[in-house]
Amino acid sequence: MTAPDPPTRLYDALCELDVQPADVRGDPSGKTWLPDELRALVEADERCQKVLAEWIDEELEFFDSVKLRPDALFTDRVVKATEPEQIAGAGLEPARRGLVLAAAYALAAGLAILFLRQLVTETSLLRRLAEQLRGLLGG
């Protein structure tokens, strides 16, 4: 595998670089914020100078594109978007709603008891089988 050419190496390194927009605007040549190794690449190769100029243009355009004006109606839109929706059963009388909830909880508790009972029965059955196997194997 061959080493990448200088413009590619420069572009890859620039993409990994963490530079503040003010630094890029203040020094578009990169003398103050560009590492020495990259600065040497730029000074030695005209293609690298073009890569740096394009990268700076792209970065500044990117930084400028994320500036948003404050949205005066943001809070209003958030409040409207998070308004509660109609919940099924919310219109029932409190007593009737309580009965429906109690019946649902009773059903859930009954099912839980059935499952636990089955589990205990299977566990004791497995325990008896294990004891019989131990007896047969002489353990």
Image: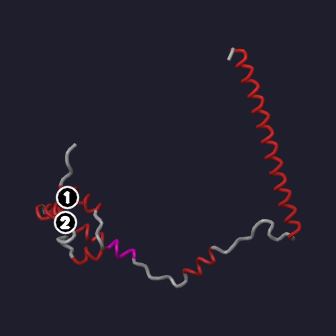
Crowding around mark 1 (Cα neighbors within 10 Å: few <14, some 14 to 19, many 20+) is some
Q: Residue 7 has which mark?
A: 1
Q: Provide residue 64's location: percent of width, then percent of height.
A: 35, 76
Task: Give the vertical position of 1 relative to 108 (above or below).
Answer: above
Nearer to us in this view, 113 or 94: 113
Pick whichever of labels 1 and 2 is earlier in the sequence.
Answer: 1
Q: Quadrant of the N terminus?
A: top left
Q: Provide residue 120's location: percent of width, then percent of height.
A: 78, 37
Specify the quadrant of the image occupied by residue 15.
bottom left
Q: Provide residue 118's location: percent of width, then percent of height.
A: 79, 37
Asked whether residue 63 is drawn in magenta, I would say: yes
Marks 2 and 1: in contact by CB < 8 Å? yes
Q: Residue at x 74, y 70 (%)?
A: 86
Q: How is the image coloured?
A: secondary structure
| Residue furthest bottom in the image | 72
Q: Main secondary structure of the magenta part?
A: helix
Q: As shown in the figure, which amino acid type bears the numbered disc 1?
A: Pro
Q: Residue at x 26, y 67 (%)?
A: 55
Q: Provide residue 5's location: percent of width, then percent of height.
A: 18, 53
Start-end of magenta stretch: 61-66
Q: Is residue 74 left or right of residue 7?
A: right
Q: Residue 50 has which mark?
A: 2
Q: As shown in the figure, which amino acid type bears the numbered disc 2?
A: Lys
